[in-house]
Amino acid sequence: MTSDTRTKYWLAAFAVLFAILWLLNEILFPFIAGIALAYLLDPVADLLERWKFSRWLAAGLLTFLMVLTVIAAFLLLIPLLQSQISEIALKAPKYFDIIQGHIQELFSILQAQLSDSNVGSLKDKIANLDQPDLFGWVGSFLKGVWGGGIALLNIFSLMIITPIVLFYLLRDWDLIVKSVDSWLPRHYQNVIQKQVREIDEVLSAFVRGQFLVCVLLGLFYATSLTLVSLDFGFIVGFFTGLLSFIPYFGMLTGLIVAISIAIAQFAEWQTVGIVAGIFVLGQFVEGNFVTPKLVGEKIGLHPVWVILSLLAGGSLFGFTGILLAIPAAAVIGVLGRFGVSHYKNTRAFTGLKENPSDEQADRLKE
């Protein structure tokens, strides 16, 4: 098989994979979720195996614990989240009026620095903000997300299919890896295995580590905001932690929402400053201690690359794309670095005569 034929073969394979994801993205989520959980829990299953558990028993125990954790989270968190969301719906118009009043006060302070026409134009824009339309749009958006989520995720199949996929993948993970390894072309086996190991290192550092970071940040923000008596402090802190896997986006979103609520709720600015200080402290501890310890400083995924991947994956394939975004980013990043490294050994880069083909093959095997 020539180099051009191999390239065409791989391009065709990726095109078929993309088409399958595109056509079946609405039903793939439970399977992708099962694969992701199996990847996360495989090291734990290996540990249980070393403790003399059989593989099927380790897989069954971990699947049971995962299902139990999800059920417990629903029973404990859903009622609290539901009550806070209902309270948000009741208090949001009042908060909107208060914030609008603060903005009007700010414009009155700035009036001395602006012309009368500019001040009048700005006041008209603030006064013309249609509160019912705004909250109607928010309600419609949330309703669309919920309705689309139901159709996309298919909660029933998620609760039934995902545990089954998780169990069988955990049970057969090592066998699957050995089987795939046996399919590799012998001539390029070493270089492929090396790239796969690097991809696994990047993914394990980011996914497993970032999961722990999100949990810890969610607990910190939810507890801290609740202690300062911020309305909806738990739900704001909880979702800030969940969104922290998107670099900076989660913290900034939580900060803006929490500050807005604090300005509307508290009369004194000291409490608003405390709320802001919680996010500053959380970001400082996360950036300097938690993430370097749990994720690692050199994971090969730049924050901008992560954000772009998540947005692209979500736009193309919805929730399924979000789950696939980080693995795809890791694969592209590792293969991209390998391609650049290989390019630097070619005549196109060095300007020297290319090495004989047998020496190139030996380099690929290293």
Image: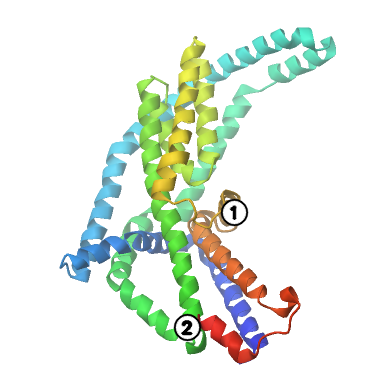
- The one of 177 and 118 positioned closer to us in this rendering: 177
Q: Is residue 19 left or right of residue 186?
A: right
The picture quadrant where one finds residue 75 is: top left
Secondary structure at badge 1 equals: helix
Q: Is residue 134 left or right of residue 77?
A: right
Could you tell me how far apart the alpha carbons at marks 1 and 2 are, in whole angstroms? Answer: 29 Å
Q: Which residue is the site of mark 1? A: 305
Q: Amino acid at mark 2?
A: Gln
Q: Position of residue 315 (x, y in %)?
A: 60, 54
What residue is rendered at 37% in x and 24% in y? Answer: 226
Q: In the rendered view, would you say 240 is above or below 165? A: above
- Asked if residue 29 shows in the view, the reply is no
- Asked if residue 227 shows in the view, the reply is yes
Q: Is residue 102 left or right of residue 259?
A: right
Mark 1 or mark 2, which has the lower sequence index?
2
- Residue 189: assigned label: 2
What residue is rendered at 63% in x and 90% in y? Answer: 357
Q: Is residue 275 left or right of residue 222?
A: right
Q: In the rendered view, would you say 243 is above or below 23? A: above
In this view, the mark in front (1 or 2)? 2
What residue is rendered at 83% in x and 10% in y? Answer: 116
Q: Amino acid at mark 1?
A: Trp
What residue is rendered at 32% in x and 37% in y? Answer: 77
Q: Residues within 10 Å of mark 2 (few under 14, many from 20)?
A: some
Q: Position of residue 270 (x, y in %)?
A: 48, 13
- Residue 251: assigned label: none
Q: Position of residue 105 (x, y in %)?
A: 65, 9
Q: Position of residue 21 (x, y in %)?
A: 54, 66
1 and 2 marks in contact (CB < 8 Å)? no
The total of numbered circles placed on residues is 2
User: What's the colour scheme?
Assistant: rainbow
